[in-house]
Amino acid sequence: MPGLYIVATPIGNLGDISARAATTLASAGVIAAEDTRVTAKLLSHLGLRVPMTPYHDHSDERTRAALVARMSHEVVVLVSDAGTPLISDPGYKLVRDARAAGRHVTTLPGPCAAIAAITLSGLPSDRFLFAGFLPNKAKARADTLAEFAGLRATLVFYESGPRLSASLAAMAEGLGNREAAVAREISKMFEECVTGTLTELSARYADAPPKGEIVVIVGPPGEALAEEADDDTLDAALREAMADKPVAQAAKAVAKRFGLDRHDVYARALTLKEQA
Ligand code: SAM
């Protein structure tokens, strides 16, 4: 069926290409590729010869319009250099325009470094925020981290070796010294996942920036202590603190002690006060 096919490709191990991805690539009229030289290696591994055209979100309107026109009668495949297109990679404008033109749009799910790193990290995976790459400049990086600090979610960052130690230190400062994991070279020969607190990990990589591709996973606030702070423990601590402090101060102290969100603890403190 003609249309746009978004195809995930391996992030290291070429064996991770799915059978459906290979068949779809083989049937493409054209492959819109982030870097045609990179995709040429994948095609050669699969023994395929398929026309390719470079595509970025900053490609001009005409390039995009031409691809959208071809989708009416051909299979147009979108790939990035590695992993899932659109995830810190080009593609969303092409998908947007294909949808606006009423084309058939489908996706072939597959490798994604962010998801693979979450599965390796041993950190809570029920709720996470994909944060992509942090800005390079210290002020912008600190501002971005401040936006994430109150979220009760695991955070996922893409990183590079030379920036790793400084980024981990900035995360410790902006988010608190949380449990974290550095997942590197996933699905490649030197895959590793190193866990520790943000300050431990920052110190570890300070003098030895690691090589290769990296994802940093940061646990939610207060994760290390959250299990100890069950509802009864929290209520007891709040009652004790409220005995000699105003509600807001008591909530702040208890939230800090258990590494919990201040607003949540304040809400609970108000409920307890009303019940008293
Ligand atoms: N779209 C891709 C995906 O689905 O994962 C991500 C593209 S983004 C431009 C590239 C970044 O993803 C790298 O800088 C690194 O942070 C991460 N990454 C890609 N492959 C990786 C791997 N094998 N191991 C660890 N991180 C990887």
Image (spheres, grey):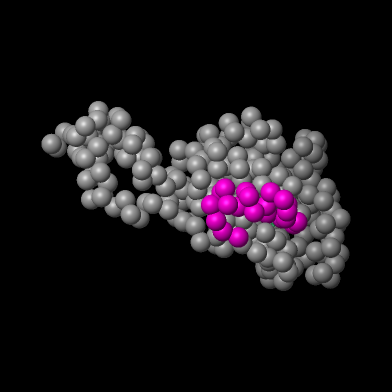
Residue at (85, 67) in percent of width and height: 44
Q: Is residue 6 left or right of residue 175?
A: right
Q: Nearer the viewer, residue 228 or 110?
A: 228
Q: Position of residue 89 (x, y in %)?
A: 70, 47
Q: Is residue 196 left or right of residue 186?
A: left
| Residue 117 position within the rendered picture, expressed as x and y whole percent measured from the top left | 59, 58
Taking the spot 78% from the left edge, 49% from the top edge, the residue there is: 34
Is residue 186 located in the magenta-colored stretch of the structure?
Answer: no
Q: In this picture, is 133 found above or below 225?
A: above
Q: Nearer the viewer, residue 18 or 273?
A: 273
Number of disc labels: 0
Magenta stretch in the rendered image? 194-214
Placement of the N terminus among the 4 image quadrants = bottom right
Residue 211 is inside the magenta segment: yes
Residue at point 74% right, 47% down? Answer: 162
Q: Is residue 223 above or below residue 238?
A: below
Q: State the residue in front, 209 or 16.
A: 209
Image coords of residue 23 (percent x, y): 72, 68
Q: Left or right of 234: which side holds 96?
A: right
